[in-house]
Amino acid sequence: MESPILNGLVLAGGLSTRMGSDKSLIDYHGKPQREYLFDALKIVCREVYVSCRGEADVPAQLNPLTDKFDIKSPLNGILSAFELCDHCAWLTVPVDLPNVSSDVLRFMVSRRDTGKLATCFFDSSAGSPEPLLTIWEPSAQPLLVAQVAKGDISPRSFLLSHDVRIIHGMDQSIFLNVNDPASRRDYTSGKISN
């Protein structure tokens, strides 16, 4: 049986409240982070989109995908992607992980298990799966909808309670989350791993 098509989604629909400015526009690699991740995803995915709130200004060439649900969670972007294509798998990457590269995405895709609901990394510092750097298979969509209907809007909760493939063996620096001005300063000055 043929594997579902893999599309990519840059998760950029958050409010960036802690950062105080749009995290997707920060330049870590010579271009805004949303463009850097969009280009990295294009290497391993059929189509790539940028998840955003309705009022967000995302250029057309980045395929903006507006959040369609009243969910204050990254599941809004993930479920909106499944609404666009429910027979596709979705590789999601959050904009606040500056150490994610095309090599990381290739590694992940090479270990994808289409027989599971999702493929994700294990973040040993958190002691749990990294919920947003994940490949979500089409079979996950109805179960995600059911979870949200029960009031649970946590992607990590889903990964902990369902049949997923968890990948080990990547440098833990890929999970470095830069989401406030202090961590951004530390990252760009080299005080924290980059």
Image (cartoon, rainbow, N blue to C red):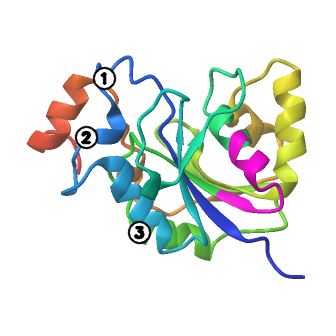
Q: Which residue is mark 3?
A: 102
- In the image, 116 versus 180, the foreground residue is 180
Q: Residues within 10 Å of mark 3 (few under 14, many from 20)?
A: some
- From which residue to which does the magenta span run? 80-90
Q: Amino acid at mark 3?
A: Ser
- Could you tell me how far apart the alpha carbons at marks 2 and 1 are, in whole angstroms? 10 Å
Q: Which residue is mark 2?
A: 26
Left or right: residue 73 versus residue 14 is right
Q: Residues within 10 Å of mark 1 (few under 14, many from 20)?
A: some
Report helix, strand or loop for mark 1: loop
- Could you tell me how far apart the alpha carbons at marks 1 and 3 are, in whole angstroms? 25 Å
Residue 44: x, y in percent? 53, 73
Q: Quadrant of the N terminus?
A: bottom right
Q: Which residue is mark 1?
A: 19
Marks 2 and 1: CB-CB under 8 Å?
A: yes
- In the image, 177 versus 5, the foreground residue is 5
Residue 18: x, y in percent? 35, 18
**175 above or below 155?**
below
Q: Earlier in the sequence, mark 3 or mark 2?
A: 2
